[in-house]
Amino acid sequence: MPVIYQKTLKTNILVITSLIFLTACGPKKKEKSKISFKSIEGITFLEVSRLQKNGLSYNEYGFHLSPDWKLRFVSDDSAALYSPVKKQYLNFPLALGTDSVFNTAHAFLKVKHMSKDSLVFELLEASGDSINLNKSRVTMRLFSEDYIKNKLRTDIATLQRPSRKDSIYVKGLVDKANADIKKAFAASQPVQLISKSPQVTVVKKVTKPSYIDNNFSTDDDYLNPKYYITINKAYKDFDYIFSVTVDNKGVMHYNKPLIGFMGDPDFEKHYIKMSTAIMESYLKLYLTTIPGQTLGMPHASTISLNVKGFVAAKK
C-alpha cells in the first residue's frame, strides 16, 4: 500500500484494539454483525484498479496507485496475498470488525461490494490507534480469476491499463514539467544513468521488499530515485550528495545539496560550487542520461545522487 494513503500498523494488538473499539463504541443502536468472507473463501481475486476519489490513479506528484493485489480469503482469521518477489502466496492475519471493516496486510479496509465475481474496498485512513470510517481517499476494485477469464474473456494486464482520464491528466503534468523543470514530477519509469567508462559505475538504490515487515515500502524508490556513482582515477577523493533535475532531453540541472551545513554559509557555497563542477564535468562526460517517462512520455523528474571519487581505483 502506498505510504501516501496508508499508515502502517505497528502491532497486531493495535488492529484488534481498533476493531474492538469499532464494535463497542458509539451510540447503542441495533447491534451490527461482523463482516464475513465465508461466501467467497478460496476464490482468488486480482486487483484491476486503485483509484482516488477523483477517479484518477495518478496524483499531482506523479505517483501511480498500482493495482497489484492478488488476494484470497483462507479462513475466518487468515487472508493470503501473492508476493511477486517470493513467487508465492503469503498468509496474513485477518481481523474482522463491524460496519464492513476488516484489517489484513497492515491495512484497514471497508467492503463496499462483495460477490463471487468482484470486490470493492475502500482503504481507510489510520492515525495512531484510531481509524476514520468516514474518510477514504482510495477505492480498490478486484475481479475473480474466473470472472476475468470466462465472463469478461480478457486478461489482467488489459484491465489494469491506465484510463483515458489518467492519460489526459498525466499529459497535462508532462507539458507543465517540460515547460518549467520546477514542475518536475516522479517518473513511473525512472531516469536511467548508463556509464560510458569502465572507471565509472552507477548503482540505483533498490529497496528489498519484505512482505512480512510492517514498515515495508518501496515508495521512496519511486518518488525519490537515488543513485550511487563511483568515479575511479578521479582528480582527488571526494564525496558529494545532491539532487538534480533531469529534463525531457536527458540534461542534468543542479538542484540542491542534500546535507546540512550547520549554519556555515562558506562551506555551503563551496560544496555547491564543487558538486556542480562534478556534475558538469564527470557526470555529463561519462554518463548517458535517459530521461524518466510516465505512460511513454519523457518528462523532467528529480533524482538524488551520491557521487564518490577516488584517486586510486576502488576495489
Image (cartoon, rainbow, N blue to C red):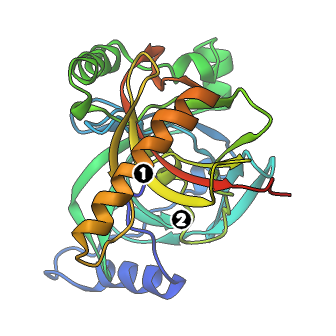
Residue drawn at point x = 28 percent, y = 58 percent: 269
Callout 1 secondary element: helix
Answer left or right for 16 relative to 235: left
Image height of 309 relative to 250, above or below: below
Which residue corresponds to mark 2? 104
User: What residue type is disc 1 on?
Assistant: Met
The answer to which of 180 and 79 lies nearer the viewer is 180
Q: Residue at x 16, y 82 (%)?
A: 28
Residue 217 image offset from top left, x and y in percent: 53, 59
Q: Nearer the viewer, residue 44 or 139?
A: 139
Q: Nearer the viewer, mark 1 or mark 2?
A: 1
User: Is residue 40 at least partly visible in the picture?
Assistant: yes
Disc ID at residue 274: 1
The reply, left or right, for residue 61 in relation to residue 156 is left
Residue at 59% over, 57% down: 38
Within the image, what quadrant is residue 185 found in?
Answer: top left
